[in-house]
Image: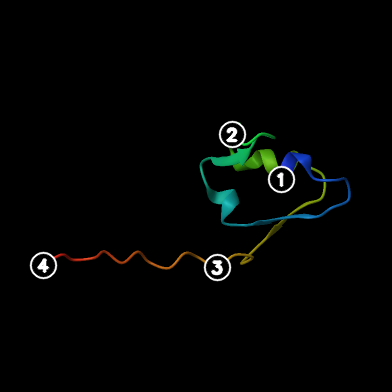
Amino acid sequence: MTAFGLPAGLPLWVDAAVMKRERIVLGGGSRSWKLIAPPSILRTLANVEVVEGLANPAPPRVELVED
């Protein structure tokens, strides 16, 4: 479900790291529709709360070395 389709009153928690991105990709209401926007668009939604440290950072990538 896209953030824009959440029922009224349902909280929407966003990790603070998301807000530091240049742009984000959100569902547009259909599997084939995507919305590319600045993260500030999330602040237009009711019940949005930006939470520091909500998500864990991705582990570093390990490159496989072929012999």
Residue 67's label in the rendered image is 4
Q: Residue 46, position in %: x, y? A: 82, 44
Which mark is nearer the camera, 3 or 4?
4
Residue wearing tag 2: 34
| Local SS, label 2 | strand
Looking at this view, name the residue that lies furthest to the left.
67
The residue where tag 1 is placed is 1
Residue at 58 percent across and 38 percent down: it is 38
Measure how far apart labels 3 and 2 are at the Cα level.
25 Å
User: What SS does tag 4 mark?
Assistant: loop
Does residue 1 lie above or below 56 as drawn?
above
Rendered image quadrant of residue 27: top right
Marks 3 and 1, how far apart at CA: 22 Å
Q: Contact (CB < 8 A) between labels 2 and 4? A: no
N-term-proximal mark, 3 vs 2 = 2
Name which residue lies at 72% across and 44% down.
Answer: 3
Which of the two labelled residues, at mark 3 and mark 1, occupies the earlier sequence position? 1
Dot 4 amino acid type: Asp
